[in-house]
Image: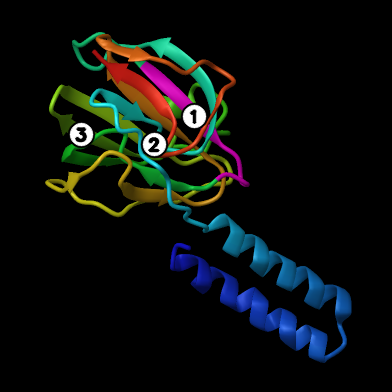
Amino acid sequence: MVKEGYQFASAPFVLGVIALILRWTWTGAVLILLALFILYFFRDPERVIPPEPGAVVSPADGRVMEIVEEPFGARPGRRVSIFLAVWNVHVNRAPRAGTIRQIEYRRGKFLAAMRSRASAENEQNIFHLETDRGEIVFKQIAGWIARRVVAWKAAGSRVETGERVGMIRFGSRMDVWLPMEAEIVVRPGEHVAGGSTLLARWK
């Protein structure tokens, strides 16, 4: 459980208990259910990390929306976009071991996370990760409901494959940019789990 979950859930839970004491049954029930949902949303399960030397894992739970060829600067590569629904785990993980060279915060819009434009136009944190085989870029992208992207690491931090790096609150999107030499093994429509689903193999 992410500790913030207890902070967000405490107010509706206490108010719900007070409402039940005052015999405002429906109000109390709704508030307590809301508190339980918040605790469920902030869950943080352990994951088994693939041991393959060239493994690139999914940074988030959700559904693969699209895989498109997209250069990053002058470098050719592909972008994998993952949509996180409100019922998915929202803790984000490093797709591969390496050093976070930079975390770039960009202000932006709050378009629905399922729209392709959200990758470029929405508020986001951009992680530049230097690995033993080259650079990976991945993004925490806010959505229409999710309006807070939270990074738990700083530039210069060393991370292991599947290590927790941050969280997006309430429904959102994550993008991963990989160079062409990485063989992507997922397909659009496939459901992935952060830290444990193999997203690509780096040749």
Please name whichever residue, 38 or 122, is drawn nearer the observer in this view of the structure.
38
Q: Secondary structure at mark 1?
A: strand
Q: Quadrant of residue 100?
A: top left
Q: Do the numbered discs 2 and 3 sit on residues whose CB atoms are within 8 Å?
A: no
Residue 52 in the image: x percent, y percent? 29, 27
Residue 165 in the image: x percent, y percent? 31, 48
Residue 164 in the image: x percent, y percent? 33, 49
N-terminal of the pair, mark 2 or mark 3, is 2
In the rendered image, which residue does mark 1 sit on? 82
In the rendered image, which residue does mark 2 sit on? 59
- Asked whether residue 133 appears in the rendered view, the answer is yes
Q: Do the numbered discs 3 and 1 sit on residues whose CB atoms are within 8 Å?
A: no
What amino acid type should be assigned to the residue bearing mark 1? Answer: Ile
In the rendered image, which residue does mark 3 sit on? 129
Q: Counting other residues with Cα less than 10 Å from the Cα at mark 2, is it few (<14), some (14-19), or many (20 or more)? A: many
Q: Residue at x 65, y 74 (%)?
A: 12
Q: Do the numbered discs 1 and 2 sit on residues whose CB atoms are within 8 Å?
A: yes
What amino acid type should be assigned to the residue bearing mark 3? Answer: Leu
Q: Counting other residues with Cα less than 10 Å from the Cα at mark 3, is it few (<14), some (14-19), or many (20 or more)? A: many
Magenta stretch in the rendered image: 79-88
What amino acid type should be assigned to the residue bearing mark 2? Answer: Pro
Q: Residue at x 52, y 24 (%)?
A: 64
Disc 3 to disc 1, C-alpha distance: 18 Å
Disc 2 to disc 3, C-alpha distance: 12 Å
Q: How many marks are shown on the rendered structure?
A: 3
Report the magenta stretch's main SS: strand
